[in-house]
Image (cartoon, rainbow, N blue to C red):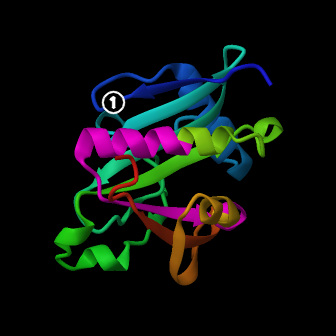
Amino acid sequence: MPEPVVHVAGPGEVAPEAYYATRYAVLRAPLGRPPGSERLPDDDQALHVWVEVNGAVVAVARGHLIDGDGAAADHSGPGAAQIPSFSPLRHAAPDLRPAMQVRQMGVIEAWRGTGLGALALDHLLRASVRTWGARTGWLQAREAAIGFYVRMGWDAFGPPYDIAGVGPHRSMRRSLDGLFD
């Protein structure tokens, strides 16, 4: 495999259109969603990671700081399904904060299983610790991705649930304390 190149854009920095095109191709087009549904209202405040191979964006990951409990709209367009909260974050839990959430992570199908998803996730978590001092990571994993996240050190919690129009999910978390010392 040619050498992958990893890019990170911090809050306020602009990710290239190829990053958003890959987000759409991997995560939204398969659901029949319109172009633009891959964009989230707080993208300008998020971290964005993309991995290029031979100049093509083949893996993407996005993370943001969680102010509340993580409940949000699935996308910025009309008719967006509601994503449930992370129950442990509903309570004042200073040992869990700052908390970051992984969203919009995916790898072009031809590149899955090559380690590029793990590379993107690692860079996202490191950037979250550097940028926000994140102590915990949270995500809602599609059923097909749960095994990947478990291999990356994430723990599922709570019962499975369905996000309308997307499918079965599990909430997952992991500690980031001391991970990158």
Q: Position of residue 71 (x, y in %)?
A: 36, 66
**What's the magenta region?**
121-145
Identify residue for label 1.
Answer: 10
Looking at the rendering, which quadrant does residue 124 occupy? top left
Decide if residue 140 is on the left or right side of residue 148. left
Quadrant position of the N terminus in the picture: top right
28 w.r.t. 179: above or below: above
Q: Position of residue 93 (x, y in %)?
A: 20, 75
Answer whether residue 128 is magenta in the image. yes
The residue drawn where x is 44% and y is 34% is 48
107 w.r.t. 155: above or below: above
Residue most extreme to the bottom: 159
The residue drawn where x is 70% and y is 41% is 115
Looking at the rendering, which quadrant does residue 100 occupy? bottom left
Q: Position of residue 30 (x, y in %)?
A: 73, 47
Would you say residue 157 is visible in this rendering?
yes
169 w.r.t. 135: above or below: below
Q: Position of residue 56 (x, y in %)?
A: 68, 19
Would you say residue 37 is visible in this rendering?
no
Amino acid marked by disc 1: Gly
Decide if residue 163 is on the left or right side of residue 83. right
